[in-house]
Image (cartoon, rainbow, N blue to C red):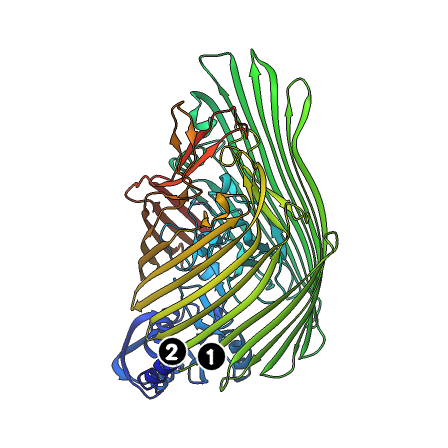
Amino acid sequence: MRLIYILVLMLLPTLAFSQEEAFYIEFKDVLLQNAIEDIEDTYNVLFSYKDDYVKDKRISVTRKKRTLLEVLNELKTQTNLNYKIIEKRYVVVSLAQQEEIDNTKKLDLVLIKSYLTKGIEKNSDGTYKLYPSQLGILPGITEPDVLESIQLLPGVLSPNETASGFFVRGGYADQNRIIWDGINIYHKGHLFGMISPLNPNVASEINFINKGTHARYGERLSSVININSKNEIANTLNTEIGINGVNADAVIELPIIKDKLNIQASLRRSYTDVFETFTFNQFADKVFNSTKINEAEEGENDFSFIDYNLKLNYKLNTAHSFYASIINIDNQLDYFSIESNTDRSFNDLLNIRNAGYSLRWNFKWNNKLQQKTQAYFSDYELNYNFLTFENNEQVSNFEKRNIIFDSGLSTELNYRVSKKFNYDFGYQYTLKDVAYAFLNTTNLRFVLDSEENIVQTHSAYVNVDYKNPNFFDISFGLRNTYFQELDAIRLEPRLLVFKDLSQYFKLQASAEIKNQIISEIDETVFSDLSLENRVWRLANGENSPIINSKHASLGFIYSKSGFSVDTDIYLKRMKNISALSLGFLNPENIGFNIGNQNIFGADVFLKKRFRRFNSWISYSYINAKSQFSDLNNNKAFNSRTNITNAISTALSYKLHGFQVALGWKWQTGRPYTIASDNSLGDLEFNNGINTGQLPVYHRLDLSSTYTFKMSKRNKLRGKIGLSVRNLYNRNNLISREYRGNNSLNDSVEIIERYSIGITPNFMFRLYW
């Protein structure tokens, strides 16, 4: 730390910035919004403005060396807007002087604007903010998908190429908490995770938190993805419809009472049960790879999904506002196959549904004290049947059930004492009722495995924010949770420190403790189940204890003239991780094992903007080790999240309404357990767990979009897009696993799964 301090002192003179420094700058009839982006990069400032202020405004500035003040004076003359510099870095754009303070409240926390692209910001509290309506282009993505965009951030990896099955800083996918308008989401994604379960055209603001978590957030260890639909009450009718290679959707904002009441609604549905595109077939080939569905010679696949959102915004007066939100996500699969050389046929029936409801009341007591009260309910159901027929008569039925009833009530007081001190006090009550069951029906019905648990939690928390530009910005939180049925109390302190070492050089440090009571397990009771093998279960204090995590990180950010460097190193230690031991890996210990996981990692991100080009490259290093009692001779081994090295890079270009992006991903292969053949032709596992490594993974993605106006006489606009995943059709091996019946007399089967092949997709949308 002493060496770092000395280096920082040596850098300070070179990082000095003067508001009077002049640069060459020129604009020829460009949109004001585009000009602002260039000014931000050139003078290393951040603008705060409402979109309506700059919409459709155009400017022209002759090439000349100008200071920032001279540029702003020129903009003021041409746009009739006010521009005021605050704290030598923030430029507030307003129609009137009194608006300036309100406009800068949000921006004064921004460290890097346009992190990967426009619409993604990194803030001084360690969080990332994503604004889908403003999101620029990202490689392989034509629509502003929430979960797909997050996967491009440093330290986030999705080795299975699914929308929601990503690892954050070496943590498992079930350690990521996804919240929609206060509702916990458990659905893994449409088409078995290939498509995000959340309509990307509805979300208004997303907060992604991977460190220094505010005390209001509990339940998961690795990350929080808090997604909110629009809370603003629009007074005009706004509608959009769109279609891509898998589904079509529609979104509407309908004003009911001016400035008081409006309704937002969306509907998205696949059309693959009517017409199968090449895009869908590529998704399906990847999903059903190494399953009975893929191996069947004859079969009929009836798959569809639907999701919808409905939100009511009501503003009674300046002190009271109310919100009601509904979300529903539904997947259906009906696959029927026939074995041509026998009289047997099979039927896979799968229904996955996640419905949620929330109510929120915001009350402003006075200018310093505000209160938010919320209630929510989330209902998740998974129902799977694998039917076997002989001579058209049913002879067996394997069933799998997973049900979650998750409800809660919370209230939070925000007390802003002064510009330096801000306090949050809150209480949360949640009730989780989780059950799963595996049944086998032949002549009689047998319960192969089942479990049901209920846990009520009571959490009280306080979070104190202290901001002093001349000292440190410190956020300290303390969360105390009582798990009623488990009779356990857990304290969770949180700390985040931020320091402006200079105008360009920032320091961030964080430390936190978290606990988790709900997680997923791999259930392999019988080999015929090949879809959705992971089910949710609650901690029970026995073979599924409360999982605990300690996480600390230290990082630096440098940003100047469109060039940014963001570095972070971290250490995570997790206790009471559960693993299901398979009989063919450990014949003497079949069942759950409790262990620990230690993770050391580093993330490095570099970005450079120059005129219409934007480029970035990120590197992540992870060393994740697991250790379980009675597994691997009690020795530590590589975790399945241990992807040691990962690199991603992208280059994008924007000209008026046209955008194009090219991106490449490269990462070392996942660990796997080596198996060898014995003299009897059976598989043996003698080299330990996860001692092998899959081949290197890499792929190239391309995206391009074009936005245009349909007519000058109305507000009808259009947008078209094309994306291609895995442009050079690399056949990546992404997992090698083993499947059996947990019986020593049954053979063990190797299951290898490969990445998606070259997959083009299109998009067309209309806005009015």
Q: Position of residue 561 (x, y in %)?
A: 32, 75
Q: Position of residue 236 (x, y in %)?
A: 56, 61
The residue singled out by tag 1 in the image is: 499
Q: Badge 1, how many Cα within 10 Å: few under 14, some, many 20+?
A: many
The answer to whether residue 338 is left or right of residue 538 is left
Q: Quadrant of the N terminus?
A: bottom left
The residue singled out by tag 2 in the image is: 4
Disc 1 is placed on an element classified as strand
Q: Badge 2, how many Cα within 10 Å: few under 14, some, many 20+?
A: few
- Tell me the residue at 59%/42% (across/down): 592
Q: Which quadrant of the structure image shows residue 47? A: bottom left
Circle 2: residue type: Ile
Q: Which quadrant of the structure image shows residue 647? A: bottom left
As drawn, the residue found furthest toward the front would be 633
Closer to us: 533 or 30: 533
* C-beta proximity under 8 Å, tags 2 and 1: no
Q: Is residue 767 visible?
A: no
In primary-sequence order, the first of circles 2 and 1 is 2
Mark pair 2, 1: CA separation:
14 Å
Circle 1: residue type: Lys
